[in-house]
Image (cartoon, grey):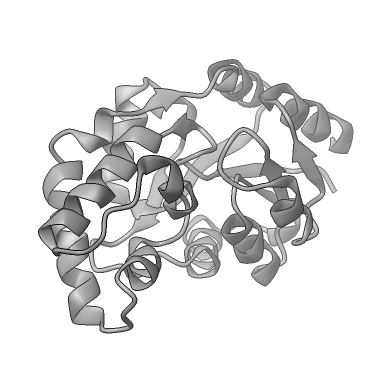
Amino acid sequence: MPYKTLLFDLDGTLTDPFDGITRSIQYALEKMDAPVPEAKDLHWCIGPPLWESFEVLLNTGDRSVQDRAVAYYRERYTVSGLYENTLIDGITNLLEALRKAGLDLHVCTSKPHAYAGKIVEHFDMMPHFGKVYGSELSGHRSAKADLIAHILEEEGLSAAQTLMIGDRKHDLIGANANGVAGIGVLWGYGSREELEGEGPVLVAAKPSEILQHVQKAA
């Protein structure tokens, strides 16, 4: 069945947020008087909800401690980290081609929608998307399975005609939980092994491969 709607993850899929996210995590850890890893050792934090990352980094399941770390993170991220970010090569052409083909596109990110919308606007991507869906500042709907379920209901979408595109296993796990097909991308922060482990319909090495897959399915 041809796809009608594509859901795009943001961090590591549409943009590369490495500097902004890792510097903001380091800032939060300093504020918490915790060990501060080098930026290169924090790449795994890009994708999952922040609370999950701080649970590991601070070695605690105490939600109140995690909340403090998230608050410190946002103290820096909302001022400068948001824009320490670059657009992935080929993404603009992909979005233009998909829209020209008549497909509906939405952003589906674990990042709070209040921040995600600013990033999408900053890179002039908003005209391509119907809506930017993300979590609440409280962390509600930061799990991709919950967020995708919300989008399907909110937009009245058929799971069989919807495609989720992301760079981490969390994107594909969320898609699978909702009966939605998934594409993993290799220009982000997940390995081929991580992505293939969740049974995607495609693991794309470059944005143009997504367009080719969608065209073949039409």
In the image, taking residue 61 as reference, residue 206 lies left or right, namely right
In the image, taking residue 205 as reference, residue 54 lies left or right, namely left
Q: Residue at x 18, y 80 (%)?
A: 64
Q: Position of residue 101 (x, y in %)?
A: 69, 24
Q: Residue at x 70, y 59 (%)?
A: 180
User: Quick check: 133 above or below 203?
Assistant: below
In the image, taking residue 172 as reference, residue 27 lies left or right, namely left
16 and 101: which is toward the camera = 16
User: Quick check: 19 above or below 144?
Assistant: above
Furthest residue in direction right, as rendered: 216
Q: Position of residue 121 (x, y in %)?
A: 31, 27
127 and 110: which is toward the camera = 110
Q: Quadrant of the C terminus?
A: top right
Q: Residue at x 31, y 67 (%)?
A: 139
In the image, taking residue 94 as reference, residue 183 lies left or right, namely right
Q: Residue at x 66, y 58 (%)?
A: 172
Question: For the image shown, how many numbered marks are present on the structure?
Answer: 0
User: Quick check: 217 above or below 123?
Assistant: below
* Rendered image quadrant of residue 95: top right
157 and 93: which is toward the camera = 93
Q: Position of residue 109 (x, y in %)?
A: 44, 50
Q: Position of residue 120 (x, y in %)?
A: 36, 31
165 and 218: which is toward the camera = 165
